[in-house]
Image: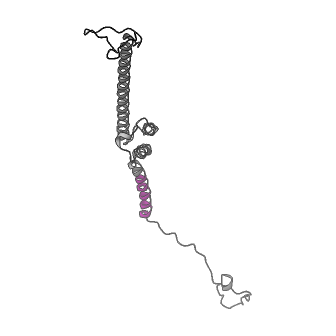
Amino acid sequence: MAGIADSTPQNPAPPSKGAPVKKKPSIEIHAPERERLSPFPLVAGIMLVVVGAAFAVFSQRNAPDPHLVRAKEVVARYEQGKPPEAIDYDSPSYAEALGELALVERDSKWAQEADDLAAEIRRKIAEQQARVRARNAEMQASQERQQQRDEEFFRVQRMEPPHDPNAPEPECEEGGRGRGSGEHGGHKH
C-alpha cells in the first residue's frame, strides 16, 4: 500500500560537502478547508420544523374530539337497522354516549356539537319516558274501569236472590202459575 512512508527513502545517504543540499519533500496533511455555510439551508430547515409542528397542531385541532367520535359510533351502532319505534332510549348505549359527550373538552370547537347531541339524546329519552308514563297511566285507568265494572256486576248479582227450583212460584195474572207453569204444572200435587 502506497502511503506517506513510501514517499521518503528508507536509508538516505549523508549529504556530501559542497553538494547541493536536496530538500526533503515535505508532505503536509491539510484538513479540508472549512466551507462557509450559507444561512439559507439552516433557515429553511428551521422553517420546515416550525411549519411541520404548526401543521401537526392544526390538523389535530381539526380532527373531531375522540369522545364525540366515540359517542356518535355508539349511537350509530345501536340504532343501525332499527325502525324509530323500536329504539329504546333507556338502552345502556345512550348512557354510554352521554358519558362520552360529557368528556369533550369544554373549550374545544367540538363542544357545541357535543352539547347539541347530548341535548337531543336527553330530549328523546324524556319523550320516551313520557310515552311510557302515559301508556302506564292508560293501562292503570283501564284496569280501574274494569275493576269498577266487575264490582258493579258482582253487586248486582248479590242483589238478586238465587233461583230455588223448589220455591213456590208467584201466580201470574192469567191464572196460571209463574215459572214452570204449563201443561205439566210447576208443582207436584
Left or right of residue 41: residue 127: left
- The residue drawn where x is 42% and y is 50% is 60
- The residue drawn where x is 37% and y is 42% is 110
- The residue drawn where x is 57% and y is 72% is 31
Rendering coords of residue 104 (x, y %): 42, 40
Residue range corresponding to the magenta coloring = 37-56
93 and 56: which is toward the camera: 93
**Residue 109 occupies quadrant:** top left
- The residue drawn where x is 38% and y is 8% is 168
Q: Main secondary structure of the magenta part?
A: helix
Magenta residue check for 52: yes
Q: Quadrant of the N terminus?
A: bottom right
Rendering coords of residue 188 (x, y %): 40, 11
Q: Residue furthest left?
A: 174
Rendering coords of residue 18 (x, y %): 69, 91
Q: Is residue 186 above or below residue 53?
A: above
2 and 90: which is toward the camera: 90
104 and 170: which is toward the camera: 170
51 and 94: which is toward the camera: 94
